[in-house]
Image (cartoon, helix red, strand yellow):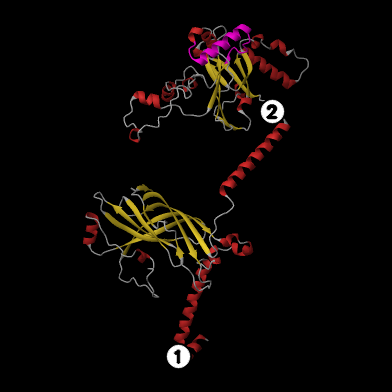
């Protein structure tokens, strides 16, 4: 019989659109004795054999089962069922002081006068009763002891009683108490859980000895937050108590099912409510959506400097700024530079990593002036410099790097490697270690191609550098242009908006490569034309 009991006592979460006041729970508590087990075993045996010649089953059913060993009743939400101890307590008017206790006194007197009490063992604690987690941890077995947290929470005042109003005149300098006293902690740390709770209990004492607190046992706890979420936590399907007695608990949801017509009306009501809420949100947004002028691309970047790894020293911070190429512009109040906080490194695997998680935002506009394919605009660039601080607040340059913003919208995770200028010799290394300081770049755009450079080739011959660490960026790029919503350009919408505006893309990169090959081919032809005629014929014959 014990094998069929459900021993899963974990908390279950339910969601319902119906009001919690319609909840009905059927509770059945039955003492498991040897005669009950024997009777049920014989019933199962007879039902399996289906022999009409066997004796009647009623002769094997113990008559005591209908007495003190079994109790079954239906409990409504927040229905107050008094235990025997509460019946004895609230009979005396002298023991009732609060308005709730006086109300219970009136109800108990009415139950005694009309003899309308329908419960003996099963009773409830509602939201307004004083029932703390101390009881919840010491109900299933006599050997279980309350935890330290349960003991402390049992002395905390109830959330709904003796509420204090917030004093808005408290100065900000005293909002934090750095050395709180014991009385301050006890009075200030109030249970702030906004859920409504109901406990279903049972008095598992022997017949004739009901009403003792040590015999009370928690059967089921129901909590709701008022938003249609219900938490149910049964203590167990089988309860062992005191003198090795075993009780079997059965819980059923006997709430009245909603009629089909009422369910259909409720669905229509929810649909109407959702549609009205959608219209309300649309009215807040409006229909006049802001659009950039024709031929203008709006670029919005929400970025994050995630981490830095592989650098030599600790206490790192990053100084960064944006460079706008030609035909790009920003709003006057748009910041184009920033500095992160100083972050200490931690060892992750074999690398020293500084976790910045520093957010930044950037917004720029590109205006197309020349629609020819040969005029390929550049993309905004973010230059950054990683520095470190020592104990005396002296900084060292750890590395330079740059990041070209992606030409496609969406999320991008980019890792940028850095390098720093290097001076040969031992003196520069000692100076960097002891007194700080290191060679720096006057123009940070020198890590790429300086914007002021107008030649064909940039030579860095003789410039000594050292590879340092890397910086990880997390970018969310958004592109906004009128070409996206132009109904006549459906085919162009599948392409990159930068291609529609004559900007840089993969096709532009391929075009640059093909143009480089064409220039190389023209140079080879010019070189061949400059050679003597006999050399050209000899090379032609060898080629054939």
Relative to 422, is 338 above or below? above
Indicate the position of residue 397 as horizontal and vertical percent values.
30, 58
Q: Nearer the viewer, residue 487 or 314?
A: 487
Q: Look at discs 1 and 2 and give the one toward the viewer.
A: 2
Q: Which mark is residue 535?
A: 1
Asked if the residue at tag 2 contacts the one at tag 1, i.e. Cβ–Cβ closer than 8 Å, the answer is no
Q: Nearer the viewer, residue 248 or 361?
A: 361
Q: Which residues are magenta?
A: 96-122
Indicate the position of residue 376 as horizontal and vertical percent values.
49, 70
Q: Nearer the viewer, residue 48 or 204?
A: 204
Indicate the position of residue 352 as horizontal and vertical percent values.
35, 50
Relative to 25, is 434 above or below? below
Indicate the position of residue 82 as horizontal and vertical percent values.
56, 14
For residue 423, what is the image quadrant? bottom left
Residue bearing the label numbered 2: 257
Q: Is residue 349 left or right of residue 298?
A: left
Picture residue at 52% right of the left edge, 58% below the top = 479
User: Is 480 part of what is drawn in magenta?
Assistant: no
Q: Residue furthest bottom?
A: 534
Relative to 243, is 539 above or below? below
For residue 184, what is the image quadrant? top left
Dividing the image into 4 quarters, which one contains the N terminus?
A: top right
Relative to 231, is 33 above or below? above
**Could you say whether the residue bearing mark 2 is in a helix, strand or loop?**
loop
Compare marks 1 and 2 and give the one earlier in the sequence. 2
In this view of the protein, can residue 205 be seen by the observer?
A: no
Q: Which mark is residue 81?
A: none
Q: Is residue 179 left or right of residue 405?
A: left
Picture residue at 72% right of the left edge, 30% below the top = 259
Picture residue at 65% right of the left edge, 15% below the top = 38
Q: Is residue 101 left or right of residue 56?
A: left
């Amino acid at each position: 019989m014990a094998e069929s009991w459900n021993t899963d006592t974990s908390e279950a979460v339910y969601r319902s659109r119906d009001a919690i006041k319609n909840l009905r729970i059927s509770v059945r508590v039955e003492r498991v004795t040897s005669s009950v087990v024997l009777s049920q075993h014989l019933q199962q045996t007879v039902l399996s054999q289906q022999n009409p010649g066997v004796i009647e089953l009623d002769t094997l059913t113990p008559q005591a089962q209908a007495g003190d060993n079994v109790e079954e009743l239906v409990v409504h939400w927040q229905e107050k069922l008094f235990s025997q101890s509460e019946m004895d307590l609230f009979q005396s008017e002298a023991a009732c002081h609060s308005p709730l206790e006086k109300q219970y006194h009136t109800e108990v007197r009415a139950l005694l006068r009309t003899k309308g009490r329908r419960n003996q063992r099963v009773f409830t604690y509602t939201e307004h009763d004083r029932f703390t987690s101390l009881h919840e941890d010491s109900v299933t077995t006599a050997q279980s002891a309350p935890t330290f947290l349960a003991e402390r929470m049992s002395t905390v005042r109830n959330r709904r009683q003796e509420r204090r109003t917030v004093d808005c005149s408290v100065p900000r300098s005293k909002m934090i108490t750095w050395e709180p006293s014991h009385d301050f902690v006890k009075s200030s740390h109030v249970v702030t859980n906004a859920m409504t709770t109901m406990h279903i209990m049972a008095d598992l004492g022997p017949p004739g000895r009901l009403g003792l607190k040590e015999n009370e046992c928690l059967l089921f706890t129901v909590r709701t937050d008022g938003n249609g979420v219900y938490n149910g936590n049964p203590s167990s399907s089988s309860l062992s108590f005191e003198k090795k007695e075993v009780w079997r608990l059965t819980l059923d949801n006997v709430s009245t099912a909603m009629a089909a017509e009422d369910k259909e009306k409720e669905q229509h009501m929810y649909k109407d409510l959702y549609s009205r809420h959608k219209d309300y949100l649309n009215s807040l947004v409006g229909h006049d959506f802001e659009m950039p002028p024709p031929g203008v691309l709006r670029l919005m970047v929400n970025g994050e400097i995630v981490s830095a790894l592989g650098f030599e020293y600790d206490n790192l911070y990053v100084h960064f700024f944006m460079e706008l190429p030609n035909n790009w512009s920003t709003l006057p109040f748009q910041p184009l530079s920033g500095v992160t906080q100083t972050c200490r490194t931690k060892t992750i695997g074999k690398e020293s990593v500084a976790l910045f998680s520093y957010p930044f935002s950037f917004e720029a506009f590109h205006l197309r002036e020349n629609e020819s394919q040969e005029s390929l605009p550049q993309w905004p660039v973010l230059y950054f410099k990683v520095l470190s601080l020592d104990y005396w607040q002296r900084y060292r340059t750890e590395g330079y790097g740059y990041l070209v913003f992606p030409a496609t919208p969406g999320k991008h995770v980019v890792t940028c490697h850095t390098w720093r200028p290097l001076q040969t010799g031992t003196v520069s290394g000692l100076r960097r270690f002891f007194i700080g300081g290191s060679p720096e770049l006057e123009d940070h755009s020198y890590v790429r191609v300086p914007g002021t450079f107008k030649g064909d080739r940039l030579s860095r011959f003789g410039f000594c550098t050292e590879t340092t660490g890397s910086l990880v960026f997390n970018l969310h790029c958004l592109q906004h242009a009128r070409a996206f919503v132009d109904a006549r350009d459906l085919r162009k919408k599948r392409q990159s908006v930068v291609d529609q505006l004559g900007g840089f893309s993969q096709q532009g990169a391929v075009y640059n490569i093909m143009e480089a090959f064409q220039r190389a081919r023209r140079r080879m032809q010019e070189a061949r034309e400059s050679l003597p005629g006999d050399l050209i014929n000899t090379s032609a014959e060898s080629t054939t």
